[in-house]
Amino acid sequence: PSFVIARAIGSIRHTPNSNGEMPDEIATVDEAQCSHGKNSGIKMISVRLPDGSEKSYESDISPRKIAESIGARLAQAAIAAVADGRVVDLDRNLGESVEPKDGPIELRLLTPKDREALDVLRHSTAHIMARAIMRLYPGVRLAFGPTTTNGFYYDVEIPGRQLSDDDFPAIEA
């Protein structure tokens, strides 16, 4: 087995040779290597949380994993995240969600108490409604589906018919 000693500026790895003896030399592990001492090719990113603390993570970490590392209740309550001012999905790799830059990624996890979280829920719900309409009415054409201050809507065109209040139970099912 090998073991890794992490330091702020890098890591040191000792790996026994085939006889199980520890070699005299120490192999330095680059920051872009994972904690198991194998080069993963994954870059490290720095994340700044709202409390001002900064943490380093592998760039393939998701906002959900960061929330889990902070606490189970936060992870369960999180709806989405804001990374460098942009709303991002909880399960998307953070390194893919923002533009590369120098300095930490500003990350805020959105929960139901955040105004932006309501917009995310409304946006997602609009897509779910559009999907339901597409399944019920083949050939439907969808135009807009923005969120509003009071909810959301979708402009739809169904060849040969108009939607009415009577259609809502089937759409909502």
Image (spheres, helix red, strand yellow):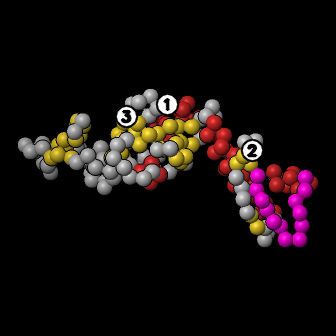
Q: Nearer the viewer, residue 75 or 152?
A: 152
* Distance in Å between CA atoms under marks 2 and 3: 35 Å
Residue 48 x %, y %: 41, 36
Sequence-wise, the earlier of marks 1 and 3 is 3
Q: Seen in the image, is 79 located left or right of residue 26?
A: right
Query: What label does residue 54 carry, if any?
Result: 3
Q: Quadrant of the N terminus?
A: top left
* Distance in Å between CA atoms under marks 1 and 3: 16 Å
Does residue 90 appear anywhere in the picture? no
> In the rendered image, which residue does mark 2 sit on?
151
Query: What label does residue 91 carry, if any?
Result: none
Residue 116 x %, y %: 61, 40
Q: Which residues are magenta?
A: 153-165
Does residue 19 appear anywhere in the picture? yes
Residue type marked 2: Gly
Q: Seen in the image, is 79 located left or right of residue 158?
A: left
Residue 163 x %, y %: 87, 59
Residue at the image position 62 percent from the left and 39 percent from the top: 117
Q: Give the image quarter of residue 144.
A: bottom right
Which type of secondary structure does the marked residue at label 3 adopt? strand
In this rendering, which labeled residue sits more in front, label 2 or label 3? 2
> In the rendered image, which residue does mark 1 sit on?
71
Residue at the image position 46 percent from the left and 32 percent from the top: 50
Residue at the image position 50 percent from the left and 37 percent from the top: 108
Residue type marked 3: Glu
Q: Work out which residue is located at the far top of the displayed protein and give it.
A: 51
Q: Residues within 10 Å of mark 3 (few under 14, many from 20)?
A: some
Q: Is 162 placed above or below 127 here?
A: below
* Distance in Å between CA atoms under marks 1 and 2: 31 Å
